Structures are given as C-alpha cells and as structure tokens.
Image (cartoon, grey):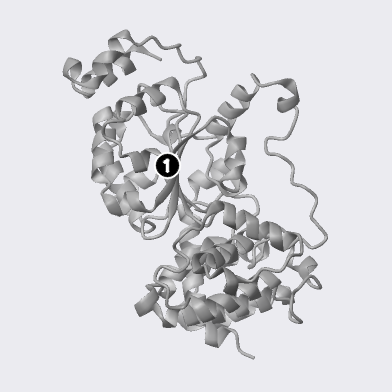
Amino acid sequence: MSSDLLVDLHDELGGDDSPSAALDQLKLVPDKQWPPDDPVSVSKSATDIKSLSQGFHLAWDDPFYDIARHQIVEVAGDDNFGRKVIVFSACRMPPSHQLDHHKLLMYLKQTLDNYVESDYTLIYFHHGMTSENKLSLSWLRDAYREFERKYKKNIKAFYIVHPTMFIRTVLIFFKPLISFKFGRKLHYVNYLSELEEIVKCDQLVIPSRVRAYDDKIRLNLKPSVVSGHMYPPHSPPLPSQQFGVPLSLLRGKGSDSEGVPLVMRDTISFLREQGLQTEGIFRRSANVSLVKNIQHKYNSGEEVNFFQLEDVHLAAVILKTFLRELPEPLLTFKLYNDVVNFQNVDSVSQAITIRNMLLSLPEENYSSLRYLFQFLAQVSAESEVNKMTNMNLAVVFGPNLLWGQDAAMTLSSIGPINNFTRILLDLHEQVFTQ
C-alpha cells in the first residue's frame, strides 16, 4: 500500500483523535505493482470498445451526462436470486481533478432511485482505484450517511471484488459508522469465478482491465485451477431438467399443447390466484436455499405445489429465475437489435411493428410470451394495490426477457429493452390478436 493512502486514511478520519490513530502502528504488505490503470478502462477488445462508444443512456445536455459517459455506474439486470444488480467500476473513474465527486454521488443516488423499491445487489470492482482517481474517505463517509434507510433497507448484498489490504483496512476503521445489519451484507470476492454463484457473468458489466487483472492473479493459483475453466462447467442436464433448457426441448416435459413450460404455468397459476394484490410482487427476493430447493425439485421431476408453500415472493422469484436461465431469451437473440432500436418506431406503427416482430418467434416462445403478458396485464390492473404499473413491471421483466448474445447488460441497452417491454404491455391486446 502506498504511504499517501495511509496518510489520507489518517488525516481524513480526523488525525490522532480518531480511530485511525492506530494506523501509526499498522504494518501492511505493499500491493503488487501491476501495470498502471487506464482510469476509464478503454479496452482493446471489440466488445468493450463497442460498449463504451455506443450512445449513452443520457442525452448530451443532461446534467449528469459528464458523469454517465464514463460508465462508472451500470445496471446489469438481475442476479441469480431475482435481485437487481448495480455495478460500480473503480477503473473507469478518471483522475480526481477531472471528476466532480459530489456529482458522482448524486448520480449514483439517481440511478439507485429507479431500483431501491426492489431488492438489489451492489457489486463494486475495486481494481483500478489508484492514488490519482481515488475517492476520499470523507466522500465514503458522506456517501454512507447520504444513503438513508430507503437505500439501505433493500440492498441484500454488497460484493467487493478484488479487495486490497487498503479497502479492508478502510472498512475496519469505518466499522463504528456501519450498522451491524449493513455490515452483514458486505462480502469480499477474490476472483471473478466466485461471482458466478451470484450472477451470470456473461451479462455482467466487467471492464476488460478487471478481467485482465483477474487472469493475472489467478496465475498464482495451483496449475490444476489455472488450467481449468474460469467458471465451473455446467453439469449435464437431467432427463426431467426444467431450468437452463431451451424451450424447444421442454416440449413433452410438462409443457402444455402450445409449448408453455410447466414452471411458467405453475407459478403464474398460483400468482393469479394468490398474488395479484400483494404489494411489491416481483420486487422482493426469496430465501436463497428455498429457491435452490424448488429448482432442484423441478429438475428432478418432483411435483411443486405453490399453493401448499403459500409464498408469493418465492413463486415470483422462481418465474423470473426460469426466464433468466433460458439459454436463449424468450424474445430470442434474433430480435435484440429490433428491440433496442424500437424507440425509432413512431407511435402509430408500434402495434403492427411489434406484431410482425413477434411472428418470427418459435411457436413455444410466442405462446409463452403471450401467456406471460396476459398475466402481467392482470397484475397491472391491480396496480393501485400492488404498486406494479406497466412501467414498474417493465423494469422488473425487461432484462429477463432479452439480453445480447455477446454483450453485457448496460444502462444504454436496458433502457430501450424496458421501454419496449412497457409498450408491449400497453399494447398487448392489439399485439396478441387471435
């Protein structure tokens, strides 16, 4: 650790009168000297260049455009437990004199405002935080205080990826400020492979510099680990597998005559009867072990009865999880560009354009989509009670209905996908004509 970071930690927490006085005796192992970080993480890979150069989700005259253009904060769909994922990448931060840190805090709050009513997960990529672009400790203290209860209540997990001795030390000395409840949500992640238990990494916004750093530190692992895959290989599907299986292969495995899969019919039938008036339906997560248990039962061919379980949020999470784990999204990779560019279609032509787009879907995809949207329309009809308007439902379901085949979820793609989902809900009666 460089001495200036220790000085900052000492000075910014109040000198000898603060807990940081103990740092005078603290002996830390110096960090390994990795190549200098490019603060905005401009990568040589085509995927990252495409991601960073495409239109940002904010207009150039938006007051937060100068913050958003660095893509420090991103939203990456849902994690494996049905919670929205917010990503913060330190390596994309420019030098401190080029970034208004107070404005960054306000932008982070504005981004979270769209999701704090739902359960969410925060993933922080620490690699790339240097003496040039580091956030001051007073900023971290102010940020923790700025995020009042509504932000802290629904954050279910905060993952710090590639933690250094410095960040661990900072958290130790911030301990008096951090509530016990919030402290239990903090988790260290040493390697990207560990994230696969939490979220689909191929849909996660991971800067190339972070991936390269992860490759480098993994070279210190045992050869047997290095020679393996970055992520553990998937087990072969069981004969009765329901999750992670193409819809075409689910026909004959409990799907109805039109190809609507068993999991969708089970969850939606229960939610139609028991969940329409549940406030925040689809916004809450469920017990992780329960979710895994239900998935195992389905994959093993066991019967699942949600009416016996009587857990609305469990059924809601299982439905979202089923959609998210499809090898190809319900709206298919083929429609990705059409959906992302749908904002260019004039309002008069929207219904017929969507109808023509959906005609290209395989029969089981079309039937399942129609079945889902007929149900979501019923949910929205009870929005005065359950608070799930078409827009709120679109924010929840958009990233579970469509993602790019070779691109991570970003705010610039999630926005158009959510907008298309809302319009489809608005026009579902015209689109899904018999």
Q: Is residue 200 visible?
A: yes
Where's the N terminus, which quadrant? top left
Q: Position of residue 424 (x, y in %)?
A: 52, 76
**As displayed, is residue 150 above or below residue 173?**
below
Q: Position of residue 234 (x, y in %)?
A: 74, 46
- Residue type highlighted by circle 1: Lys
Is 13 placed left or right of 227 in the picture? left
Res. 219 image quadrant: top right
**As displayed, is residue 21 above or below residue 192?**
above
Is 140 placed left or right of 235 in the picture? left
Res. 352 image quadrant: bottom right
Image point (81%, 73%), residue name: 252
Q: Residue furthest bottom?
A: 434
Is 401 placed left or right of 258 in the picture? left
Where's the C terminus, which quadrant? bottom right
Q: Residue furthest front?
A: 308
Q: Position of residue 381 (x, y in %)?
A: 43, 83
Q: How busy is the neighbourhood of tag 1: few (under 14 within 10 Å), some, or many (20 plus)? A: some
Image point (29%, 43%), residue name: 105
How many marks overall? 1
Task: From the image, tell me which residue sits under label 1.
Answer: 185
Image point (70%, 76%), residue name: 260
Q: Is residue 357 visible?
A: no
Image point (72%, 75%), residue name: 364
- SS at badge 1: loop
